[in-house]
Amino acid sequence: MSELIQMLRLIRQYRRASQLSIEALQVVQRQRLEALVAHAQRHSPFHRDRLAGVQPARLELAQLPTMDKTTLMERFDEIVTDPALRLADLEAFMAAPGNQGRRYRGHVLIRTSGTSGRSVVVAYGAAAFNHVRAVNLARGSMVDASGSRILQRALDPKALEIACVLMDGGFAPSHANFLHQPAASRWFIKVDRISLRLPIDSIVERLNAGQPQILFAYPSVLEQLVEEARAGRLDILHHERARVVSLSEPLSPHVRALTAEAFGAPVFDLYGAGECLPIARSCEHGHGLHINLDMVALEIVDDHNQPVPSGQFGSRVLITNLFNPTLPLIRYQLQDIAAITHEPCPCGSALPRLLAVRGRSDELIWLEHPAGGRRSLHPYLVLETMLGIEGVLDWRLVQREPRRLRLDLVLADGAQASLAEAHAALQAELDALLPGGSVVLETRPVARIPVDPSSGKVKRVVPLSAARRP
């Protein structure tokens, strides 16, 4: 029960903070940043050297060096501030059967999939993970998560039904919240964790039987469930405050609209990473994703780690996790392509917003230039091109050779003409990138874009190195 009381206090804190002005939120962010840097300097050998001479009260975040995944894994034991945590021990614990959902010395462990870069291990202290759960309840997409409402639910004999169709990867970040659900909350929140490894008819059967009020799933899974709902085989989400929550993959406007129409429920989008779970989330208005400014310092930068103007897409995202002092990640690189805006949102929140998260820059396709060198093809360019073609429901671009690509398209019924239109549009982009005719593009219709077997996610841009894997 003490855990529940602590959770209620944190929920109240984050709900109140959501109503603060942007200036007040920046003060909170600054206080947490200074405390994090000071803690890292005292307790992390890596940061003691890296941040030598930095005075927390006077630091300029943009002047600090950056970190990446390789550095995190190679120097994990020097970065972590708890000397009882050693990477070899954590990896052995995660590899041992039966440890899924268990904590290591009180820490929640997460391993990222590595489908768009190197797999990393992250350790969250117990207090830090309470902040993750609290902010998701306070600002996320749960049914009214005020403290009074949660207490009411605790006395309600009918539990809140949640279904999540996710990869059952043991320590995957996408379902860490569900694996480590507080014991007290199980009285009034029932979570059905459904593996997407199951056949689609088995998933549908579980969902129909459970009748969830809230559905969590990857966008690629939502597309399949929409198809099942349209065919009359899936009939769920009839609660007056039912909702759908998308996570882990970029949610396109097309899939969002299809999902909202099929289920008659609002669709929310969550953006996070294993290294910093609750980065941002959308509101019911759907105009971007609100950044949890008091939990993360987020920078949109170019190839040289310089900030880009508001509204402009950068080459990567830098995050500073402000709530997990166990593993200080300060200006840590995520290879996401995103843009930020400070324009006010119709919902009234003062939190700044990500306009979109459009794929990963470490999923770039590099094309060989006839005159030497190479040029990069950004995933968001392909995405924008495909979004402009009516009748294209889904796509994947596979690099077969240095200047040969294959575009797989899932087309709507009767939209065969879109095949040629999509081919011409993308070929025009390629011809603008390299001399006309340098890149050979093959375009073909497919029934479905397959998911990556190791992560359960859709990989829509497959560079040559990945395409050649067995």
Image: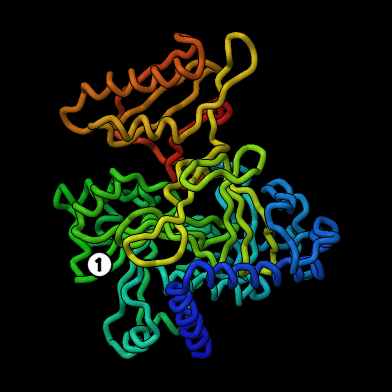
- Give the residue type that dot 1 points to: Ala
Q: Quadrant of residue 373?
A: top right
Which quarter of the figure is the C terminus placed in?
A: top right
Front residue of this view, candidates 103 and 8: 8
Rendered residue at 65%/43% (across/down): 305
Colour mapping: rainbow
Q: Is residue 117 visible in this depiction of the protein?
A: yes
Q: Quadrant of residue 206?
A: bottom left
Rendered residue at 33%/18% (across/down): 424
Residue 55 lies, with reference to residue 127, above or below; the image says above
x, y (%) of residue 158? 27, 82
Q: Is residue 195 visible in this depiction of the protein?
A: no
Front residue of this view, candidates 429 and 76: 429
Q: Secondary structure at mark 1?
A: loop
What residue is shown with label 1? Answer: 242
Rendered residue at 57%/56% (across/down): 298
x, y (%) of residue 381? 44, 31
Disc tally is 1
Residue 375 lies, with reference to residue 254, above or below; the image says above
Residue 349 lies, with reference to residue 416, above or below; the image says below
Direction from residue 121 to residue 51 in the image, left or right: right
x, y (%) of residue 230? 16, 48
x, y (%) of residue 155? 32, 90
Direction from residue 377 to residue 166 in the image, left or right: left
Rendered residue at 71%/49% (across/down): 66
Q: Residues within 10 Å of mark 1 (few under 14, many from 20)?
A: many
